[in-house]
Amino acid sequence: MSIQRIGVGPRMSAAVIHGDTIYLAGQVADKAAGASVAEQTREILSIIDGLLAEAGSDKTHILSATIYLPDIATFAEMNAVWDGWVVKGHTPARATVEAKLAAPKYTVEIACIAAKA
């Protein structure tokens, strides 16, 4: 079975497709880095939409998501954006964890696994 990579970099790919499964690396908000959790979440979800489209899928096919927050007190702020983005009836399995991220300017990171559409 072939493996396709999207956004290949020196350390990681933004997405890897194997069979009918799409694995997205943890995404952070580069443009909104340093901005609010809500702004960063919006940018990340937009990035996820774009990567899934490029891989032949969409957010209704997300199987699982892992959300990393350096401060769990921002959980409600992130969820306010997430809840407006996720499609009712198509919510993925999800975990949200508090974890230190790569740089203090990042307040959200989201990784997910999706099926091809």
Image: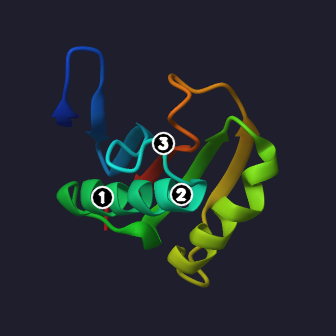
- Reply above or below: 73 against 104: below
Relative horizontal placement of residue 31, taking residue 86 as reference (left or right): left
Relative horizontal placement of residue 73, taking residue 48 as reference (left or right): right
Q: Quadrant of the C terminus?
A: bottom left
Q: Mark 1 or 2, which is nearer the eye? A: 1
Q: How far apart are marks 3 and 2 (CA)?
A: 29 Å
Q: Which residue is drawn at 54% across and 74% down?
A: 86
Q: Which residue is drawn at 79% across and 44% down?
A: 72
Q: Mark 1 or 3, which is nearer the eye? A: 3
Residue 7 location, x and y as percent?
18, 36
Q: Do the residues labelled 1 and 3 touch (CB within 8 Å)?
A: no
Q: Which amino acid does label 2 sit on?
A: Leu
Q: Which of marks 1 and 2 is nearer the N terminus?
A: 1
Relative horizontal placement of residue 5, taking residue 67 as reference (left or right): left
Q: How far apart are marks 1 and 2 (CA)?
A: 12 Å
Q: For mark 2, give the secondary structure.
A: strand
Q: Are marks 3 and 2 in contact (CB under 8 Å)?
A: no
Pick whichever, 93 or 37, lies toward us.
Answer: 37
**Residue holding disc 1:** 52
Q: Are marks 1 and 2 in contact (CB under 8 Å)?
A: no
**Residue holding disc 2:** 63
Pick whichever, 100 or 55, lies toward us.
Answer: 100
- Count of marks overlaid on the render: 3
Badge 3 crowding class, 10 Å Cα cut-off, few under 14, some 14 to 19, many 20 or more, is some
**Residue holding disc 3:** 34
Residue 100 visible, this angle: yes
